[in-house]
Amino acid sequence: MFSCALFAQSGLTDYVNPIIGTNGMGHTFPGACAPFGIVQLSPDTDTIPQNVNGAYQKKVYEYCAGYQHRDKTIVGFSHTHLSGTGHSDLGDVLIMPTVGKLMLNPGTSDHPENGYRSNYSHDTEKCTPGYYEVVLDDYDIKAQLTATERVGVHKYTFNKGKDAHIILDLIHGIYNYDGKTLWSTIRVENDTLITGYRITNGWARTNYTYFAISLSKPIKNYGYVDKERVLYSGFLRKFDLNHNFPEIAGRKVVAYFDFDMADKESLELKVALSAVSTDGALKNLKAETAGLDFDQLAERTKAKWEEDLDLIEAEGNNDQLAMLYTSLYHTMINPSIYMDVDGQYRGLDHNIHQADGFTNYTIFSLWDTYRALHPLFNVLHPQRNADMVESMLKHYEQSVHKALPVWSLMGNENWCMIGYHAVPVLADTYVKGGNVDASKAIEAMVSSSTLPYYEGVKDYMQYGYVPFDRNGSAVSVTLEYAYDDWTIYQMAQKAGNKKVADEYAKRALNYRNVFDRDLGWARPKYKNGEWKKNFSLLNTHGEGFIEGNSWNYSFYVPHDVNGLITAMGGDKKFISNLDSLFVMELPAKYYENTEDVTKEGLIGNYVHGNEPSHHIAYLYAWSSQPWKTQYWVREIMNRMYKNNIDGLCGNDDCGQMSAWYIFTAMGFYPVCPGSDEYVLGAPYLPYMKVKLGNGKIFEIKAPKVSDKNRYVKSVKLNGKNYDKMYLSHEDLMNGGEIVFEMSSKPNKKRGISSETKPYSMTDGKF
Amino acid sequence: MFSCALFAQSGLTDYVNPIIGTNGMGHTFPGACAPFGIVQLSPDTDTIPQNVNGAYQKKVYEYCAGYQHRDKTIVGFSHTHLSGTGHSDLGDVLIMPTVGKLMLNPGTSDHPENGYRSNYSHDTEKCTPGYYEVVLDDYDIKAQLTATERVGVHKYTFNKGKDAHIILDLIHGIYNYDGKTLWSTIRVENDTLITGYRITNGWARTNYTYFAISLSKPIKNYGYVDKERVLYSGFLRKFDLNHNFPEIAGRKVVAYFDFDMADKESLELKVALSAVSTDGALKNLKAETAGLDFDQLAERTKAKWEEDLDLIEAEGNNDQLAMLYTSLYHTMINPSIYMDVDGQYRGLDHNIHQADGFTNYTIFSLWDTYRALHPLFNVLHPQRNADMVESMLKHYEQSVHKALPVWSLMGNENWCMIGYHAVPVLADTYVKGGNVDASKAIEAMVSSSTLPYYEGVKDYMQYGYVPFDRNGSAVSVTLEYAYDDWTIYQMAQKAGNKKVADEYAKRALNYRNVFDRDLGWARPKYKNGEWKKNFSLLNTHGEGFIEGNSWNYSFYVPHDVNGLITAMGGDKKFISNLDSLFVMELPAKYYENTEDVTKEGLIGNYVHGNEPSHHIAYLYAWSSQPWKTQYWVREIMNRMYKNNIDGLCGNDDCGQMSAWYIFTAMGFYPVCPGSDEYVLGAPYLPYMKVKLGNGKIFEIKAPKVSDKNRYVKSVKLNGKNYDKMYLSHEDLMNGGEIVFEMSSKPNKKRGISSETKPYSMTDGKF
C-alpha cells in the first residue's frame, strides 16, 4: 500500500514511495531533491529540544531527517537533510508561510497555536521523487516543493491571502542546541531578492550555508527579531534595524517578509544554496532556475529521476517494485554535490577551491557506504564514483591530519564511527577499473592507516591489535583495520607497489590477534596479551564492540573467510555459528537499551539495521552449505524491507541499506569490496535488467522465483552453465544475461568444490 | 624630549616619536607597522572589561588603540590597531611569550601574577616607525616587533629559556565583550606552521581575520583551552583534543605552544593576516617575508618609512620636527590596505572580490578625514587617494544600501558619526584632477545622499532640514548635509551634469534653514518650523549637536562663508563670535561630562580635539580681520600638539589631527574640500620642502617666523607678490616656492579686498 498518493500516474517515479522509512528508525525524509543534489527541501515536523547533553539526547537521533511520520505538526520547510543517518544535523534555512497574526517562534508540538508551526494531515501529503505537497491546515496554505541540485523551489497557494507572511528562521536546525548558529546575516537586496548566510557548529563542526532567495512577488514589508541580541556598534542604533532595514545580522535571527496576496494566489520562492558565498548562491540560482517557474522545474527534476531510475527495469508485484525503486531512489540522495555551478567549493581547510575536472561531493558515511553503496556506484555510476574518490583525495590533501575522510559532512570531518573506510572505496574503484591516480591514492591510504593519534592506530601498529584497555571498541576496530589493510595490500599489489603490498598483507591478518581460538570467537584482548574475562558473546556495550556483539562482529573477516572458518573451529562450527545467529532467541536485555536496534529489526541475533552484519548471510558460500545463503537473504528481504512508513528496520544510512537491497535483489553481493567478485545469493525477482555504467546491459532472469522457489538449482551465464559461487566484475560489466533456475528445494551439490568458491586471502591454514 | 629612545640614530624616522598621544586622549599606539599596512603589531596594556553596557563603557574608549602609557603591564602583542579613533575594536590575534608555569588567562592589571600578562618598564621600551621593543619583566624576555604591510614579525629572546611558551589568545580583543569572538579555528599544519582564523562581532559587525604563523623553531608540544565549550560532534570525543590534536575550534580558545629554548636564544614568529582565507594569509606570508629574518624585515620597513617621511623636509627645533614627522607618520597608518597580495579582498557583501587595477583600502573614518587627511593625500599621495576613492566606489557597489562608506571598517559599514562624507572626498579628488570615474561617482554620491532611511535624509529632503523632533543631532546633521550637497553640486557642475548640479546647488543652501537669524546662531528646529526653546549655545548634549555646541558648530558652513557671515549678523558679529570662541572662559559643566573633551583640549570654547572646529581658525580670512587666523593657528599648534605621551589634545582620528598639523605648518589649510583652494594662515616653520605627488617640489619659506613673528606681512609666490588669501591647488601642484615675510605685528591691510578672498558659494545676500 502506498501511504502517500502520487504526483503523476506515469513512469518509474510512480513506483517510488519516499515515505518508506519516515517513521521510527529509517530516518529518511519525504521531501524533494534532485539526484545527488545538495538541496533536500523537506518538512521538519519537530525542532530538537535545546538540552542535548541531558534527557533529550535520545530525541536528537529521532529527528535525523527532521521528520517523523507520527507527528501532527510541520514547523516549516528546510533545505538540507541527511538521508537515513544515525546522527543528525543540517535543517538549514527554514521557510514557513503563514497568514494572520505574525508569530516568530516555532511553538511546540503540544501547543502549535503558540507558534508559526501548523497542523497538517497525511491525507493532503503527496510525495514522489523531486516533489512534495501538503496543506498547512492552520493557515489553509497549499505548500508544494521541488528542487534542482542546488535550489529549493517553493510554491505556496494562500487560500486566504490576507496578512500573508514568509518566515525565514535562521535559528532552526536539526540537532539544534542553544548557540548552534554561530552567526547569520540577511541582506534584502531588492524587493524580490534576499541573500544571506549562516555558520553553524553542529555535527559538521563549522558549516557555512549561503543562500539567495528570489521571490515571484515583491516584499511589502519585512523585519526580524534577534533572540540573543549581541553587541551593536553604537551607530547602528540610529536605524530602526528591526523594520525594513536591509542588513540583518545576529546569532538568533528569525526574519519575516509580508506580502500582498489575493485569495487563492500563489507565491513562488527559489532558494539557492552555496557553501562558498552569496555570489555562489546567486550563480547557482541563475544557472539552475532562471526563467523557469515551479511547474517547469518540478517537471525537469522528475525527468532526471525518471532517467536515473531507468537504470533498472524489473518485474515484481507492486510492493516489491516500490521497495526496489525506492531503494534505488535512496541510493541517489547522498553523497551530495558540494560545489557551485562554476566549480568553486569550500574545502576541508575552509578555503575556497576550484574543482578542475571533477565534481566535488560531500556526505560520505563511509563506515556504512563502502560496503554496498560505493560498489553499486561502480556498477551504475562509475563516473560519479570516480568523482567521489577524487573528492576524498582532495579531502586528504586539504586535511591537516593528512587522512582520507572518515565521515565527510559539508566540508568537515566529523570522525563518526570507526575504521578508515575511504581506503576500501579507493581500492574497490581501482580494482574495478575506475579512474584513480594509484600512486596518489596509495599515498593517501598509507597516510590514513598510520595516523598515530587516530583511534588506536599507534597501538595497532605496535601490537597487531588495538588493546581493549586502550579503546572500548577495540575488537571492532581491529577487525575493520585488518580488512581495510587488506584492501591497501590488494591495491598496492595491482599497482605494482610491492613494498606497501607486503607490509599490508601482514597487517591484513591482524584479525587473528583478536580471535580467541579456544573460544572460537573474536574477543577483547588487553595490552598484556590477556583476554577479557567475563566475556559475553551477546552483549555489545562494554565488550569491545560497537553496533554489533561478538556473535555478529566475529564474522567480520570478509577478505579471509577461509581463515575465519579456521579461527571459529572449522566448517561445521562456522555453519552452526551462522545458523545460530539467525535462529537463536535473543533475550531483550541484549538490545532494548541499544538506540538503533528494535525487536522488529532482529532475525534471531542477526541485526540487519547495523551494517557489520550486511555480508554475513553470504558467508555460507565459503562453507559446505552455500544454499543457506539463498534461504536467509530472501528472509531478510521479506522481513526487513516493507513498503510503508516503518519499512526500514534500521537507519538507511545514506543508501547503504538500500544498496544492499538492490544487490541482493539482483542475486549477488560485494561481500569483500576491493576484490572483483560478487558472491552469489539468489535473485529476488523473476526479471531485472540493469543499465551498466559503461552503457552495456546485464539481465538477470529467474522466471520461477518465489518465496517458495527461493533456491538456486543451476545458473547459466550467457547461455553457458555457470558453477561458481561468485560473479566477477568483468563478467558483469561485459553485459549479457545470467539465468537462475529456481527450485523449492536447495541444490546441495552446487558450489561445494573449492574451484567454485569465492576469493579468500588464505587457504585458512594458520 | 623624546620619551622613548630610538632604534637607530639616523634618518627621518629618528624624528618620529610614536609614543606621542599614547596616554589619555590621543588613542595612538606605539607598536610597529608599515606605511598604510593592515598589520599594526603593538602591545596591549589592558583588555576591556566584559560588561560594556554598564559601568565599564567609558573604559572601552580609553583602550581604542589597546595601549595607555600609564599602565604597568602588557597583556600581549596583537596585530590590528586603529590609530587615534574615538571608538574601539580589533586587537586581533594576540601573541604573548612566557616562561615557567603555563597560564592561559590574561590576569588583571591588579594581579598580573595570576595570568600570562607581564610587568614592564618604559625604560626598556624603544619605538620608531616600524619597530617596537620592550622587556617583559616577569619572564625576562626581550620582545622585538616589526611589520610588513600584511605580516607582523616578532622576535622573542628568552634570557631564561626553560619552559618557554607562546600563548595565542583568540578571545582577546579591543572593545571586548562576552561573546565577541563568534568562532575561531587553529590548524597546526606542521611543527613550524600554524594557520587559523576568527570571526568577531564588534564595531566591525562581522570581521574575518585569517592568519598564518611561521616559526623559526619547531613546536615541541601544544594544546588549548576552550573557555566556553560548545557542542562537540560525538566522535571528536575519541581524541585528546586538548593536547597535540592539530585542529582546534571554539568560541573562546586560548592555545599554547611549547618550545625547547636555550638561555638567550631567540624565537621568531611571522604572523600574516588576510581577510580572505588562510590560503591568502599564506600567500601574504610568502610574498612579504620569505627568506628574510627579523632584522632584515625591520630594516626594509624602516627604509619604507624613510622614503615616505622624506616627502617633507623641514627646519625647526627638535620638538617641532618630532611633532611634524610624527604627524606625517600618523597620516600614513589609516586608511589601511585591505587586500591580499594577489588582489583578493573581502567586500562589503562578505564575498571575495578581485581588485583589478587598484589597491583596496579600509578604515575610512570619513567624518574626520574628509577635512584634511584626504586633501593631504591629494597633495602627497594622489595615487593612493585615487585607490581609496575606488575602494569607496566598490563599497557603494557592494552595499545593499547603495551608499558610499560612512565609516568603513574591515569590510563592514559601522555607520559611525554623521553625514555622507565620502561625497566630499570624491568631489575633492575629482576637482583636484584625480583619476575618478565622474559618472559612476555622481551616481554613488546622489544615491548616498538620498537614502531615505539614513539619519533624517527623508525629512531633510522634505523639509530642507532635519527636524529636531526626529533626530537628536539634527542641526549638526543638517549643516553637514548642506556642505556635502555643495560638493555634489561642485562635482556635477565640473562634470557637466547640470540636472544634478542644479538640484544640489539648492540643497547646499539648506544650512540656512537651521540658522535662527534673530539669534545669529544655528539652532534646532522642529518639524512644525518652531525653534527649540530654552536653547543653550554652550551645551552639546540635548541641543541638536554632536561633538560640538552651537557656538562651535554654527561655523560649519565652509562652502558659503559669506552666507554664514550674513546669517550671524554681519562681519562685526562674525568676528566677535570667532573672537569669543577662542577667549571666553567655558565653565567646566559644559565639558566635564563629555567623553572626548578635556580642559587641556580647550582654547576658550574652541575644542581642537573635535573635528567640527578644525576649519574655524581660518574663517577670519573671509572677514575684515584675516590676520587673526595667523594668531590663532599658531596658538593651536603650540598648545594642542606636544612632543610627549599626552601630546594630542584629542583623538588623532586616523590622522586627521595630524593632517591639520601638517597643512597648518605649511601655512594653508583646505577649509572647503571640493573647492580647489587652500586658505592661507601662516607658516609654522622657517622652511619646508614638499615633494608633491606629481613629482614636483613646493617650498615654503618664512625665514623669520617665530612665536613672536607669527604675522604675515607679505607673500611672494614664485617671486611675485601674492595678495590672495588662498592658494590654488594648481599653483601648489605646479611646484615652486612661496615666501612669507613674517612680522611681530599684523599687516591689517592684507587680504581685505574682495578680490583676495577665498571661495564662497554666494555673496552672502539672502
Image (cartoon, coloured by chain):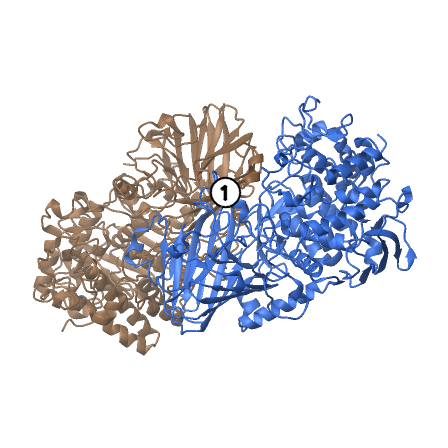
Chain colours: A brown, B blue
Label 1 lies in what chain?
A: A
Q: Quadrant of the N terminus of chain B?
A: bottom right
From the viewer's side, name the closer residue of A596 and A155.
Answer: A596
Residue A355, visible in the rendered structure: no
A563 relative to A76, above or below? below
Question: In the rendering, at what x and y percent does residue A223 appear?
Answer: 51, 32
Q: For the residue labelled by badge 1, is the local secondary structure a helix, a strand or a loop?
A: strand
Q: Amino acid at mark 1?
A: Thr
Between A156 and B181, the residue placed more toward the observer is B181
Seen from the viewer's position, the closer of residues A401 and B87 is B87
Q: Position of residue A395 (x, y in %)?
A: 40, 61
The C terminus of chain B sits in image quarter: top right
In the picture, measured across the screen, residue B50 lies left or right of residue B150, that is: left
**Quick one: which residue is furthest to the bottom in this view?**
A498
Q: Residue at x 19, y 72 (%)?
A: A762
Q: How many marks?
A: 1
Residue under numbered circle 1: A185
- The location of residue B676, given as percent across then percent down, is 81, 49
Circle 1 residues within 10 Å: few <14, some 14–19, many ≥20: some
User: In the image shown, does A417 or A673 lie closer to the viewer?
Assistant: A417
* Residue B24 in view (yes/no): yes
Q: Is residue A591 above or below residue A5?
A: below
Please provide percent x and percent y for residue B75: 46, 56
B433 sits to left or right of B399: right
